[in-house]
Image (spheres, grey):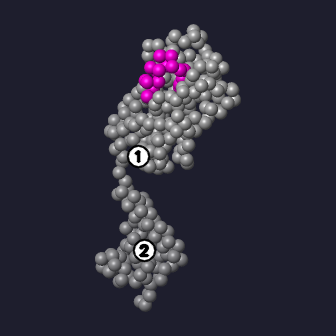
Amino acid sequence: MSRINTHLLHMFVVTAQALNFRLAAEQLHITQPPLSRAIQNLELRLGVKLFLRDTQSVQLTSAGKLLLPRALAILAMLDETEEVMARFTEPSQLRLGLTTSVETGSFSLLTEAVEAALPGMSVEISFDTSPKLVAGIKAGRLDAAVIAMPTRTFDFPVRPLGQQAMMVALSSKHALAQRRQLSLADIAKYPVYCFDRARQPAFFDYCHEVFRQHHFAPCFLLEPNDHHVLLSDIAAGKGIALLPSSFKALRLNGVSYRKLKEGDELALRLALITGISAHPETNLLFDVAKEYLHSPA
């Protein structure tokens, strides 16, 4: 059995600060005899004398002086704990952002698994560019987000999830569609779609540094924001695109996908980012995302 309880500690602190049993009893709204018995009970439990009493004064013993600051700290901690727990409410919602840098349908298994793993929680999904998802985390509009790296993430916690190699998407009627693998050099003389730098500045700069290293400088076309429009333009032979491997899931007549020799160099890396104050289900979300966002074959 514990030697101390908070009720006895509280009585001791009030008495130790008043150094007067009558005044302490009044502050505690009890009579003096129950207070005296409580102090004696505490002294018996601790095996030490806490007060020196005579007809004229009350003084703390050495043991009493040692106990007082510790008792104050214990009671303060208990008060703080009660206040924190009173304000605490278990979140009933998980606000998850998902990057549009990869084929959005590739997230379907992830979202289904998250909803199944959190049956009592509302899971709100939103899609956007990675920089805007980071801004959502910063503004407190999102609890977590799966983003494409590299992206500026400030000091927010980032956990890697895997990567998607870049591949070539081209018209099925294109002469290069007969080959199983292509290189940057192979497509350099054809128009190539490239996304606007404002959508993903860090990844744009990363890709163009790789292009520079390979002396890849084709005629770049501005990539439409809507991927279905992009694929329709590719099918029409307007240009070639470099896309993450998850886009192979989008089957469109007239579009062929081919492996890119430099695909791993240009790979888009996925990561989970959370706010400084992480959602209670962050670890579960990471485990599920790690399982379902494996690199497409």
- Residue at far bottom of view: 56
Quadrant where the N terminus sits is bottom left
- Could you say whether the residue bearing mark 1 is in a helix, strand or loop? loop
| Amino acid type, callout 2 | Val
Number of the label disc, if any, that sits on residue 13: 2
**Image coordinates for residue 219, horizontal then vertical, percent:** 59, 25
Q: CA distance from mark 2 to mark 1?
A: 46 Å
Q: Is residue 234 left or right of residue 118?
A: right
Q: Is residue 163 above or below residue 80?
A: above
Graded by Cα atoms within 10 Å as few (under 14), some (14 to 19) or many (20 or more), the crowding at tag 2 reads: many
Q: Position of residue 206 (x, y in %)?
A: 62, 35
Q: Going 49% across and 49% down the picture, which residue do you hit?
A: 276
Q: Nearer the viewer, residue 104 or 256?
A: 256
SS under mark 2: helix
Amino acid at the residue labelled 1: Arg
Relative to residue 19, is residue 214 drawn left or right? right
Image-quadrant location for residue 232: top left
How far from the left and from the top, in percent, is residue 24?
Answer: 37, 80
Disc number placed over residue 212 in the picture, else none = none
Q: Which residues are magenta?
A: 226-244
Instruction: Indicate yes or no whether the magenta region holds residue 231.
Output: yes
Write the residue at 44% across / 49% down. 139
Q: Can the viewer see residue 41? A: no
Mark 2 or 1, which is nearer the eye? Answer: 1
Question: Which residue is the extreme one toward the top?
Answer: 178
Marks 2 & 1, CB-CB < 8 Å contact: no
Which is nearer the eye, 132 or 36? 132
Eyeballing the image, is 43 above or below 119? below
Task: State the residue position of label 1.
Answer: 141
Which circle's residue, 2 or 1, is located before the other in the chain? 2
Would residue 20 be seen by someone viewing this image from the given angle?
A: yes
